[in-house]
Amino acid sequence: MAIAYWCILVAALLPYAWVMIAKASGQRYDNRDPRAWQARQDNPRSQRANAAQLNAFEAFAPFAASVLMAQLAGVDPQRIAMLAMAFVVLRVLHGVFYIAGIHALRSLAWFGGYACVLWLMLQAALRLG
């Protein structure tokens, strides 16, 4: 089960990796008003990295919930670990493809990560159902 918890930690930190890229890719960063600063950026890489950050935050809560649901329901720990690791790998790829502007692979990685979350939740529901 430790692997799944490490995956939750990595997924929680992932948005901050993308925002660091967004800030490094734009004009000189101004910490006095970071949201207004980001809104003024016209660098596509900065904009895409910021969008990757927002999407990573959106994906985190369902992922963390799905891992915890599966563990509480008694789903096989190896299956949970496999799906959690797959989710993290797919979310890293999602961010990389997002920043690179490779939209088809970004969408495929997003869908794969979402499938991992749904699979974990479904396994939990079936186990208790």
Image: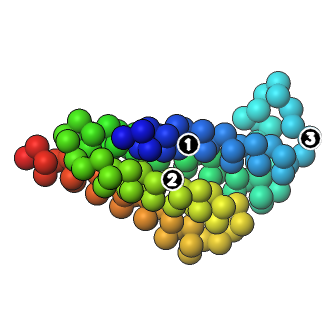
Which numbered disc flags the more N-terminal residue, 1 or 3? 1
Which type of secondary structure does the marked residue at label 1 adopt?
helix
Query: In the image, 57: left or right of 115?
Result: right
Residue at the spot x=76%, y=32% of the render?
A: 34
Of residue 44 and residue 96, the one placed in the foreground of this image is 96
Q: Mark 2 points at which residue?
A: 88
**Which numbered disc, 1 or 3, marks the residue closer to the eye?**
1
Q: Mark 3 points at which residue?
A: 28
| Mark 1 burial class by Cα count in 10 Å: few <14, some 14-19, many 20+ | some
Which type of secondary structure does the marked residue at label 3 adopt?
loop
Residue at the spot x=19%, y=40% of the render?
A: 73
Residue 125 drawn at (x, y percent): 16, 47
In this view, which residue lies farthest toward the right? 28
Which numbered disc flags the more N-terminal residue, 2 or 3? 3
- Which part of the image, by quadrant, shows the N terminus? top left
Of residue 84 and residue 31, the one placed in the foreground of this image is 84
Q: How far apart are marks 2 and 3 (CA)?
A: 31 Å
Residue at the spot x=63%, y=51% of the render?
A: 51
Residue at the spot x=42%, y=39% of the render?
A: 2
Which type of secondary structure does the marked residue at label 2 adopt?
helix
Identify residue type, mark 3: Arg
Q: Mark 1 points at which residue?
A: 10
> Residue 32 occupies which quadrant of the picture?
top right
| Circle number at residue 107 | none
In this view, which residue lies farthest toward the bottom? 104
Q: How is the image coloured?
A: rainbow
Number of dots carrying numbers:
3
Discs 2, 3 touching: Cβ within 8 Å = no
Which numbered disc flags the more N-terminal residue, 1 or 2? 1
Identify residue type, mark 1: Val
Identify residue type, mark 2: Val
